[in-house]
Amino acid sequence: MRAESRKRGCRATVGKEKMSLRRQDPKVARTLPPHFATKDQRADTAGTPWHGRDLTPSHFPGDVGERHEGVAKALDACDAGEDPTREKLVEALAGTRVLIPIQAIATETATTASGLHADNASDMAMLKLQLRDGHMALPVFTSAAALSAWSPEARPVPMVLEQAAQSAVAEGCTCLALDLGRDGAPLVLRRSALWAIAQGRRWCAPYKDSTVLDEVEALVAAIDGVDGAEVLAGQEREVELKLGLTPGLEQAELDALMARVRTYLAHSQVIAERVSSLKITVVPARR
C-alpha cells in the first residue's frame, strides 16, 4: 500500500441559522470555540488568521455515516450473483455519498538526543492501493462502519461518488476498490466504470455499449482483411473481440494485419475510456 501526500485544509460546519444571521449583519461578532477562550485572540491556524474567515456549511447535513439503502440492496444483489456485470451497483452508487480514507503522513522527522524518532510535521494523505495485477486503486467506502473496520486510524472524508472518481483519475488510479474488508466477493470497479462515473455518464458493460460496438464496426470498415467482428463478455479480460479474417492469409500477411488492428485499437479514445481490458481472438470469416 502506498500513500501520496495531499494537503488538506480543516473544514468546520455551522448551522444555517448562524450563517443567515451573519449574512444579515456582517458586524455580528465571530466567537471562537471554548477551548480557544484562554488563548490569544489573534491566534491563527495553518498560517491563516481567524479574522475574516468564513465557515462553510456541510455538503451532507444530517449524514451519520450510514450506507445508502439503495446501495445496500445493490451490494446484496452482487453477493447473490444477481449483478455479475456490476451495472446495477454502479447505477445505485451514482450521486451518493462515499467516504475516502486519509491518514497523517510524516513529512519531516527528527532524532532526539536520546535516540528517539519524532515527527516534526505531517500532511494528510489520500491512500492508494496497488492491486496484484499492478493497477492502482482508490479505496472508497459506503459507510463509516466499513471504513473504520478496515482502518480504525483513517479519517473519513465524505464526497459524492463522481467527485471521488475524478480524484482517482487525477491521482493516476485506474479503478475504485469498494468497501475493502467486507464480507462477500471483492468489489473493484475497473477503468471503464471509473471513467463513466467521473464523466457523469451512465455506465454499462462494454460488450453491450453501443459506442464501443460502433467503434468496432468502424475498425472492420477501416482495415482490409477484417471481414467481421463480434464483441463478447470476456472471461480472462473484460471484453473478448472476435475478429473474422479473410481466409487463406499467409503468416506474414496475418502478422501485418494484426499489427494494424492493434494500432487502431491503441489509438482509439473510445476503447481507452470504455474498455478496461481486451482479448483478441481470430477466426476465418464466414462466406
Image: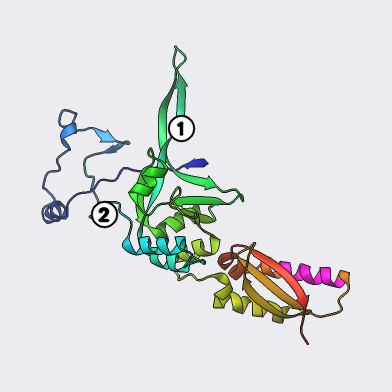
Which disc number belongs to residue 57?
none
Q: Is residue 8 visible?
A: no
Which range is magenta? 253-263
- 9 with respect to 243 (left or right): left
Residue at the extreme front? 80
Element assignment for label 2: loop
Disc number placed over residue 107 in the picture, else none: 1
Which residue is tagged 2?
Answer: 63
Spatial CA span between label 2 and label 1 = 32 Å
Q: Position of residue 222 (x, y in %)?
A: 71, 79
- Residue drawn at x 16%, y 55% is 16
Q: Residues within 10 Å of mark 1 (few under 14, many from 20)?
A: few
Is 262 colored magenta in this rendering?
yes
View extreme (bottom): residue: 287
Percent x, y of residue 220: 70, 79
Is the C terminus in the top left, top right, bottom left or bottom right quadrant? bottom right
Residue at figure coordinates x 72%, y 67% from the top left: 262
Q: Report the side of 133 relative to 259 (left or right).
A: left
Of the pair 3 and 178, the residue shown nearer to us: 178
In this view, 234 is above or below 125? below
Q: Main secondary structure of the magenta part?
A: helix
Q: Amino acid at mark 2?
A: Asp
Q: Judge the density around disc 2: few (<14), some (14-19), many (≥20) Cα neighbours within 10 Å.
A: few
Q: Position of residue 149 (x, y in %)?
A: 39, 43
The answer to whether 136 appears left or right of 100 in the picture is right
Residue 10 in the image, given as x and y percentages of width and height: 31, 42
Left or right: 240, with 139 as reference point: right
- Residue 265 quadrant: bottom right
Secondary structure type for disc 1: strand
Q: Nearer the viewer, residue 133 or 167?
A: 133
Question: What is the three-letter code of the residue carrying label 1?
Answer: Thr
